[in-house]
Amino acid sequence: MAPANHADTAAPAILQEVKPALLPRAILISNNRSFSWITEKICGIIEGKTPTWWWVCFALACFVASFTVAGIAYLIATGVGVWGHANPVNWAWDIVNFVFWIGIGHAGTLISAILCLLRQKWRTSINRAAEAMTIFAVVCAAIFPVFHVGRVWYAWYLFPVPNSNAIWQNFRSPLEWDVFAVSTYGTVSVLFWYVGLLPDLAVLRDRFYSSGNKVRSALYGFFALGWRGSNRHWSNYEMAYLILAGISTPLVLSVHTIVSFDFAVSLLPGWHTTIFPPYFVAGAIFSGFGMVLTLMLPLRAVYKLEDLITQYHIDCMCKITLATGTIVGYAYAMEFFIAWYSANPYEGFAFINRAFGHYAWAYWIMISCNVITPQFFWFKAVRHNTSFVWILSIFVNVGMWFERFVIIVTSLARDFLPSSWGFYSPSIVEIFTFFGTFGVFSVLFLLFIRFLPIMPMAELKAVTPQADVHGGGAHH
Amino acid sequence: MAAPSYGLIATFDTTPDLHHAAEKVRDAGYRNWDCITPFPVHGLDKAMGLQRSIVPRISLVGGIIGFCTGTSMIWWTGAVDYQLIVGGKPLFSPMFAFPVSYELTILFTAFATIGGMLFLNGLPMHYHAVLKYEHIRRGMDDQFFIVIETRDPRFNLANTKALLEKAGGKNISELEA
């Protein structure tokens, strides 16, 4: 006991124990809400009467979605020539819209997978809705490549299914890689989402059963697969969820990498660059967080979810938008630098043309929306002004659409030989088809918030202080 | 026990109560028992004496099958079944086969993980004695249960009930099979 006695008189040269300052844990659920409050709050949204605003929005969304239906019906009936494509721009809005929508989806997977691996517990409030956003965005994205093949009834030729010509797909092509990347992404996103829903569906099953609604109880119960909250089940479930997060992380990075290969593997100036994969992934996450903010902020206001989506959550989302937006800005600058540094006249021209050519307006919309807009998020006052954050998030969405337009159309319209140059503008059919996808997305999202729990109740409960078996103490 | 009984169920209001009770049941040597919780309770696996889940092994098998499926499909279709030179490139190369094989690795891992999880959990199982418990709704909401099954070799109605009572369980009742 000598050292202890010694310590009484003088401080030891080497501390017996180091006590680092404890940072206060961020409060993820305000007002110290109970477990049952969370259940009531989330299930109440589904069990309550359908609000009038929902019907209004749903009718509007169906109306907007009908534009896609009209555009596609006309395309099928007539042929792909109804779009504004003409040599040399044979890829335009279809691929722009595809990349735009698939990029939006990426934030959902980032929130559910990467933030799960990084133990960012604030993800729990937004991950369900963000994953739903991912799935619906993939649905909207898939419309374009499927219909741009022209004869859509041959779209199954994309998959290696034995056919009467006995010929197989060209697996050397990034377009074929894309088929696998996007279909895997869609499938895994749905599975991940569904696994997350299992325990919450069981909650709804039991609640509808006790309130006497046997039909809805049976429906939710069917999909809940008989989940009964057993800890032996939770043990396997948690492990499966972790693995799904672990495989979704390389998946989400690979999907946009492969999407960027569609361009980078070609020889076209402005496309043929090695920066594309990281640049596309950062852009995808940037645009996706823009969309998450666009969706979650109104949802938070309408359903009074301020205790579950706190200011801390908004701060986190704004900061990620800022970080990824700045990466995108860096990529824009680096593309210009490499175009000059490569001393390739075609490459150099492609970028001068982007900034000062026929499509300069699109380029400067892109720069102002994607590089300047997120810089507002440096300021706390901006992040705390929810309406302003929402408006900025719209600019992010707009800017990221223009980014894809600039990359795809400007590069194609002005390639090597001036004799093959052209100009592209969309036809009304393309405008209809794209405009309508916002309706398709909204219809799906509205159905989601009406019939499924918009937040993972089990995960929210697990991050409350009272979930801790050591009584909320900082035990590790 | 005249009427067939599935087991005894006891209610706990807080996670620390459940955690301590689970440790007691584990130390009493029970095997066929379970905790019912509305969310995964951190540390409860250890308190129940559960082994680490074997889902990752199933996932690994799925991943390996996925990668092999992708690579062999591309090799067979391009280099064996219908040889077609495109762009002067080789008929098969692990380089261009990689992206698709990589995606299929992930796809098959996901199938194996979820399939494995459901298989290990014995789901779907829409009928279960626990689900017939009248207060089961609270077990999905804000309460915690411990269920000890009658088929456990150590099960003895009086002793098991005493153990659950001593562990702090409330509303101890028998579950209909």
Image (cartoon, helix red, strand yellow):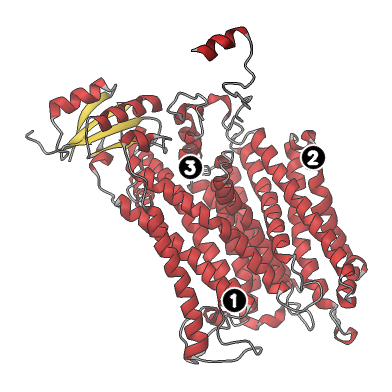
User: Which residue is most to the front?
Assistant: A2
Mark 3 to mark 1 CA distance (whole Å): 49 Å
Residue A103 in sight from this viewpoint: yes
Question: Disc 2: which chain?
Answer: A
Mark 2 to mark 3 CA distance (whole Å): 37 Å
Residues A135 and A344: in front is A344
Q: Residues within 10 Å of mark 1 (few under 14, many from 20)?
A: few
Residue A425 in sight from this viewpoint: no
Q: Which residue is pictured at 85% across the width and 85% down the height?
A: A420
Q: Which numbered disc flags the more N-terminal residue, 2 or 3?
A: 3
Q: Have a look at marks 2 and 3 and say if they share a chain.
A: yes
Q: Which residue is pictured at 56% across the width and 87% down the height?
A: B91
Amino acid type indicated by mark 1: Met
Question: Disc 1: which chain?
Answer: B
Disc number placed over residue A46 in the picture, else none = 3
Question: Disc 3: which chain?
Answer: A
Amino acid type indicated by mark 3: Ile
Q: Residues within 10 Å of mark 3 (few under 14, many from 20)?
A: some
Q: Which residue is pictured at 45% across the width and 62% down the height?
A: B109
The location of residue B121, given as percent across then percent down, is 32, 50
The location of residue A46, given as percent across then percent down, is 48, 42
Q: Secondary structure at mark 2?
A: helix
- Location of mark 1 (residue): B95
Camera-nearest label, 3 or 1:
1
A153 horizontally vs B108: left or right: right
Q: Have a look at marks 3 and 1 and say if they share a chain.
A: no
- Location of mark 2 (residue): A378
Amino acid type indicated by mark 2: Trp
